[in-house]
Amino acid sequence: MAFSLAAKLRQKPAVNVDIKAIDLTDRAFAVSTPQNMEALANSLRFAGLLHTVWLRPKGSHYQIISGFLRVQSCLELGWETIPAQVLAEDITNLEMARLAIMDNLAARPLNVLEEARAIALLRKHTASEEAFSRNLNELGLSQNPKHWAKLNKLLQLPAITQQAVAGDLIALSVGEELAEFNEEIILHFTDIFVKGKVGLNRQREFIRLVFELGCIKDLPPEAVFELPEFGAVWHNNAETDQRKKALLLLEWLYQTRYPHLTAARNAARKKIAGLGLDGRIRLNMPENFENLRHSLSFSFESKAELLELLDLCLKMAADDNLNKLFQRDEV
Amino acid sequence: MQIKHLYVDADLREHPAVSQISRNLGLAATPITSRDEIYRELAAANDPVGAGKERLLLTQNKGAFIKKCPGTKEYICCGYQILHIGTFCTMDCSYCILQAYFHPPVMQYFVNYNDMEAEIAALLAQKQIFRLGTGEFTDSLIWEPWTELSERLVPLFGAQNYGVLELKTKTVEIARLQNLPHNGKVVLGWSVNTPKVIKEQERGTAGLANRLKAVQTAQSWGYNVALHFDPLVLYEGCIAEYETVIDQIFDLLNPAQIAWISLGSFRCMPELLDIVAKRFPKSKLPYGEFITGQDAKMRYFKPLRLQLYRALVKRLQRRGPNVLAYFCMEDPEVWRATFGFNPEARGGLSHMLDCTIKAMCKLKG
């Protein structure tokens, strides 16, 4: 396969193509995602086009097989023509797909979105499972069907979410979870995750809490985003730091999902604060309040400091306020 | 759900129980040499758990028939022993732990009765009081229409003086128990819940009124009975509804024939919640205010449990002051906050239950 394509490609030299004749909207063979466009523009200004783009005649226009970013950048730089290899019509769609993938693979490792597009391209243009598998193998792409399924779900997400996954702002596994929701919900989550720079575990927590709150309140998940309290934290909050706003939102979701546990934690914090502990001593509340076993922790670097801290602990033990820690508040 | 496929381990195809069960079910038993054949079918089903409820494998219990209930040190266990007669259930309760317990879940019934009876004989030979039940890995009475299990077990227990057998169920399949010589040594136990929980979470089970009617009938046949409020499910208005169930029980039944009443709030392995959410999308059960308990199981936040328990214990003490009520897998703090004592102070929960049945069932030991 590779040998026959090389033979076909040798037949034609590069030519200058009118850049306006290239259809940038036809992304049938697009693999690349927007990279550092400024660096590309600088390179084009300094050294010109180092690597020709690959086009195929299609009606009155040219279809891009490889070089979407380069064509886009040249257009923005005001170039009127661009050097291109114009592919012969006898090259098959599968060969085009392989060419598009190989050209990207030669430039850099593919990100997950590019990998998803590459695998989907091969899937579309191979006639059998055996041919699909062989092509994946020859191109060094994943042979794992579970991984394909994840990547396939990524392609079902809105473009902005796909880009967020490609840019590592949303984890691929989270993208897979998001694909279970409708577009409105996915965009809500994307907005929060991207603006709030939310980490992987918290992304998962957000999704779970929104879904569960919807179930509890008999609301579809999208309606949770419309709750006034949600808007008050995310949209109308005076806090300008989006990361802090995302944390406040998560806190509100948690508090609404677990009202009694949150209230117990807040009450315990107050009780502990009421003891006026030295900052070096930490009094830890019981985990989930399943029992009333508290713990103390502190560190010291001399015998004198240890004695001082123990003395403070004894004073705390004598404080009547300590008893409040062992009283359960009624719900 | 109805059994639609019957399988038998190939080397058991001539076992007399197989032809009996096959005849009663109206299904030919397909001999299998490997369980993989069934597992493959289940794996290919949209709902493997539901598919497992339609398939019954007649096989041998190659392990122990009698097992200790797996308690944990953090929570107080009743010291019950399990008689492992089979696995899984034709009824479909959302909260059923068996959905997550067996991989994959499939109904199995053990036909090596001789081995089972030998283990029971060995237990009786110890001449110590024990409580044994078949309702841990399955419902005790779903097997009634197809098997001769009760005809074997009830007379066996009726003829001894050291242990009681509890048959625990959500069915009303008691007809064949009427004339068996139980001699007061068999306790018929019913899991009870509010009509709302039964309707929403216990697919294919008997309704509360029918269950209570069956309990009443069992008492009229001289059986001692047990009632299990397990799992207690928290929802708005649940306290009043559970109190009503308690009232109905004491309005209908003879308290002197109630061996015990247990209380246990919903708890489960974390992975069960995902199964419930998937298999019962309308159920709100997975969205309770759960915490991870000291045994790593999900439980309702303790103050919420206590609120419900306090109300129910108060009602139980008012309506049935002489009936032994206890918690299934709760800690000493819960006991003290509701019953006002820690079972340890009375010799332990297991001892309390043993004393009760010793008197009620006239046991020796």
Image: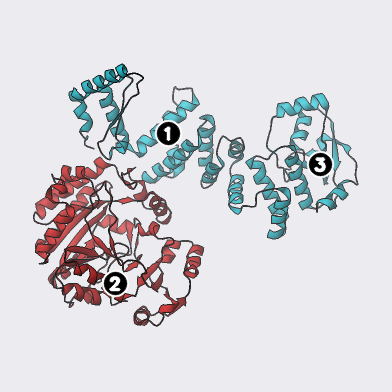
| Residue receiving disc 1 | A250
Chain A on-screen colour: cyan
Q: Is residue B287 left or right of residue A225?
A: left
**In the depicted view, which residue is nearer to us: A186 or B53?**
B53
Residue A231 position, x and y percent, is 44, 31
Q: Are marks 3 and 2 on the same chain?
A: no
Q: Are marks 2 and 1 on the same chain?
A: no
Cα separation between marks 2 and 1: 55 Å
Q: Residue at x 56, y 34 (%)?
A: A169
Query: What is the crowding at mark 1: few (fewer than 14 residues within 10 Å), some, or many (at least 20)?
Result: many
| Residue receiving disc 2 | B116
The quadrant of the picture occupied by the N terminus of chain B is bottom left
**In the depicted view, which residue is nearer to us: A23 or A164?**
A164
Name the mark on residue A54. 3
**In the depicted view, which residue is nearer to us: B285 or B185?**
B185
Tell me which corner region of the image, top left, top right, bottom left or bottom right, holds residue B319.
Answer: bottom left
Q: Secondary structure at mark 3?
A: strand
Is residue A105 positioned above or below A295 on the image? Answer: below
Q: Is residue A77 visible?
A: no
Cα separation between marks 1 and 3: 48 Å
